[in-house]
Amino acid sequence: MNFKELHYQDKPLLLGNVWDASSAKVAEKLGFQAIGTASSAFADMFGYEDGKTMTFEEQKFMIERIVKSTRLPLTVDLEAGYSEDPIEIANKIKELAGLGVVGVNLEDSTIVNEPLLIEAEVQAQKLAAIKKELAQVQIEMFINARVDTYIMSFFGRELQNTLEETLKRVKLYDQAGVDGIFVPFINESDDIKAVTNATSLPVNMVQDPNSIDFDRLNDLGVKRVSMGNSLLTAMNQNLESTLSDLVNKQEQNSMENIDAKKEQIHNEIDDVIKKRIYQNGVSGMTEEFREKLIGILSSTMDMTIATTREDGWPQANTVGFVNMGENIYLETFKTSSKAKNITRDPRVSITIAPPYELVTEGCGVSFAAYAEVETDVEVIKEFHRLLLEKFPDIAEAKYGDGDKVYPDPNTILYRFRPVVASLLDFSKGFGHADFIVYEDDSQK
């Protein structure tokens, strides 16, 4: 099948987004049918912000290296064509065809001082002129017309009726003779279905590789799926993690004895704490304590967590949290001071105060605990479901309106393993506190 025919299969064409010869070879090795570039990935490679700063010559240099490294058909993100003149754009496409490129994306927005949509009729005329110019020299190039209506909201330029404007542009570009339609950042199923119903052309969606639902997209009539800059972003995050591990390993190797001594001291301190609590006549968890503890956790939005800074001083932050029963979870950015502090020293102190109306049931609870990274995928998904439920306003701002939520690669989820819990309980007397020592996982 040629590149155009790949868009008319029983399932969507999965486009491997690449940024250099090496990534193209990986895509070919893994069995991708076709590859494509993303302007944002190229911009990252050349040290630019995504936009119109990168030159066509810089793009062409890397495109030539990619074409020579693989037998896969390559489609190129040509942004807005690096010109307003359709003949100049067509000439650039001819150059790409000479290198072996089989498709291009052309978007209908420009960024000068701010992102602006090109008038739909103007863009349609431009696309028709480009197709005509290419046909005159018998160049078959798959023109994927990108509709940037939904992107505008990311720049604070919400359209009066985004779907209506999108459908208008889809029909105009279809009539102009393009080969495919690309609508980035459209998420609602009804909107996607409206677009695929509005044209017989293959429709392209961009998706996060961690959350692609191929069955859903196929049912909605999507014929091509790309991933934009997300693969390069994931690679860079992996690179950062690997380099960070090397730096940490170097530090750890030079401080092995110190770390071993610190662990010994931590264990001794834990034993001292437990012995002190035991002397007060308290040992394991009771159902009464458990019920009051869960009641406080379930009725409280925030907690204060204290971690240890690099200079040894405590750092206290008030943060939102989610509980699953008596288990407490906190999500934070990997680059946050809290995460850095926990990486150095996983011991934390936590205080949680319930609403004043629950004062008779317990005034608050505090923990001495260890922060542990949660890696169980099902637990992580359940955390994000509960987060949406507990903080709907914040969650909507972060995750959008109702889509499935998956962990952000820039964040880390901690579960806190308590050593000691203290429940300040006014129902038993002013200043009364019950203590619980956690001996093993069965008490959490």
Image (cartoon, rainbow, N blue to C red):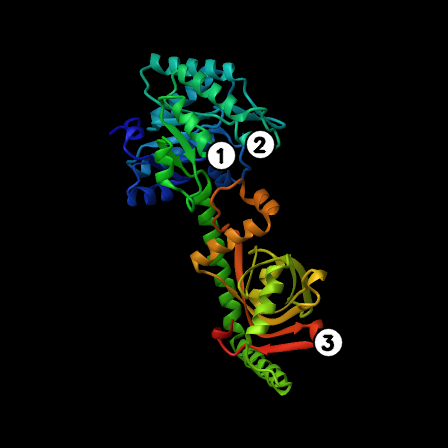
Query: For this view, does 382 lie left or right of residue 217?
Result: right
Label 3 neighbourhood size at 10 Å, few (<14), some (14-19), many (20+)? few
Q: Position of residue 6 (x, y in %)?
A: 29, 30
Residue found farthest to the right: 430
Q: Nearer the viewer, mark 2 or mark 3?
A: 3
Give the residue at mark 2.
Answer: 153
Q: Which mark is residue 429?
A: 3
Front position in the image: 396 or 200: 396
Query: Which image quadrant for residue 129?
Result: top left
- Asked if labels 1 and 2 touch by Cβ distance under 8 angstroms, the answer is yes
Q: Position of residue 124 (x, y in %)?
A: 46, 16
Q: Is residue 169 above or below residue 427?
A: above
Circle nearer the N terminus (2, 3) = 2
How crowded pointer 1 is (Cα within 10 Å; few <14, some 14-19, many 20+) is rated as some
Calculate the distance from the C-alpha at mark 1 to the C-alpha at mark 3. 57 Å
Q: Amino acid at mark 3?
A: Gly
Look at 73% across and 76% down and name the residue there.
Answer: 429
Disc 2 to disc 3, how far (Cα)?
56 Å
Q: Kindly tell me whether residue 248 is visible in this rendering.
A: yes
Q: Quadrant of the N terminus?
A: top left
Whichever of callouts 1 and 3 sits on the residue coming sooner in the sequence is 1
Q: Relative to residue 187, is residue 306 drawn left or right?
A: right
Q: What kind of element bears circle 3?
A: loop
Q: Residue furthest left?
A: 1
| Res 115 quadrant in image | top right
- Residue assigned mark 1: 185
C-alpha gap between disc 2 and disc 1: 10 Å
- For disc 2, the neighbor class at 10 Å (few under 14, some 14 to 19, many from 20) is few
Q: Position of residue 80 (x, y in %)?
A: 49, 24
